[in-house]
């Protein structure tokens, strides 16, 4: 239906949905996802039918390359999946409707990467400090190194705990403790 022939209720409806899509995009930025990718997810979520890249480009006025990159990112996070419809040769995509599943996947991926890096960095720092401690005769420096190694071991233990927490989320065991609201 042409824009000028749309009843006011439809305009209000579309504006209301668009406002919520903006909220989705804003919230997804908390997880390091760009606003445009968040809007893409929102558009797919509210679409009644799977969409092609052309459909998405038209809905969001973005380049096909940006759409492709965004869809790939969302797919990697298991928030979008490709689908098939008989008679349509272009790739079709639809959003993952289970936000709990999307969150656990997104949270797990993002936190796992950072936490693994932090564990590696702590281990490397401990190794470097131990080398320095073995080389120095300065007792004050040795004491500082010992204190810092103690702090780093504490940090490493925290990160190991965090990895266990991430596994609880990724495996879905979190829902044994905090059930989904269906």
Image (tube, rainbow, N blue to C red):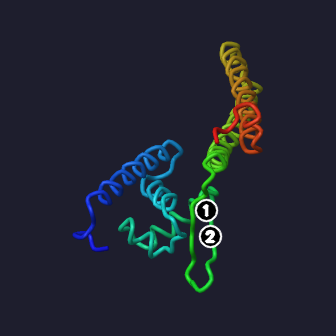
Residue 131 is left or right of residue 40, and the answer is right
Residue 94 position by quadrant:
bottom right
Residue 133 position by quadrant:
top right
Relative image position of residue 177 (x, y in whole percent): 74, 31
Residue 167 is left or right of residue 47, and the answer is right
The residue that appears at 52% across and 58% down in the rendered structure is 45
Where 119 falls versus 77 (above or below)?
Answer: above
The residue that appears at 30% across and 54% down in the rendered structure is 12
Relative image position of residue 29 (x, y in whole percent): 47, 46
Considering the numbered disc 2 on the image, is that residue within a helix, a strand or a loop? strand
The residue that appears at 42% across and 52% down in the rendered structure is 21
The residue that appears at 38% across and 65% down in the rendered structure is 60
Q: Is residue 8 visible?
A: yes
Quick one: which residue is furthest to the left in this view? 4
Checking the image for residue 82, the label placed there is: 2
Considering the numbered disc 1 on the image, is that residue within a helix, a strand or a loop? helix
Relative image position of residue 40 (x, y in whole percent): 46, 60
Q: Nearer the viewer, mark 1 or mark 2?
A: 2
Where 151 falls versus 40 (above or below)?
Answer: above
Q: Earlier in the sequence, mark 1 or mark 2?
A: 1
Where 83 falls versus 174 (above or below)?
Answer: below
> Which residue is labeled 1 in the image?
75
> Foreground: 150 or 96?
96
Task: Quarter of the image for the C terminus: give it.
Answer: top right
Mark 1–mark 2 contact, CB under 8 Å? yes
Q: Is residue 128 visible?
A: no
For the residues labelled 1 and 2, the Cα–Cα distance comes to 8 Å
Checking the image for residue 151, the label placed there is: none
Q: Residues within 10 Å of mark 1 (few under 14, many from 20)?
A: some
């Amino acid at each position: 239906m042409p824009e000028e022939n749309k009843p006011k209720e439809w305009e209000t409806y579309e504006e209301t949905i668009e406002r919520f899509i903006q909220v989705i995009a804003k919230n997804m930025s908390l997880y390091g996802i760009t606003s445009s990718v968040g809007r893409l997810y929102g558009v797919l979520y509210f679409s009644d039918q799977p969409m092609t890249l052309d459909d998405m480009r038209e809905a969001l006025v973005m380049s096909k390359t940006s759409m492709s990159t965004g869809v790939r990112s969302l797919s990697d996070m298991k928030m979008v999946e490709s689908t098939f419809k008989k008679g349509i040769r272009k790739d079709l995509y639809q959003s993952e409707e289970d936000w709990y599943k999307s969150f656990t996947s997104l949270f797990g991926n993002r936190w796992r990467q950072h936490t693994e890096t932090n564990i590696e960095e702590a281990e490397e720092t401990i190794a470097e400090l131990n080398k320095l401690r073995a080389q120095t005769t300065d007792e004050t420096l040795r004491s500082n190194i010992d204190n810092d190694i103690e702090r780093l071991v504490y940090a490493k233990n925290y990160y190991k705990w965090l990895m266990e927490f991430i596994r609880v989320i990724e495996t879905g065991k979190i829902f044994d403790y905090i059930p989904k609201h269906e």
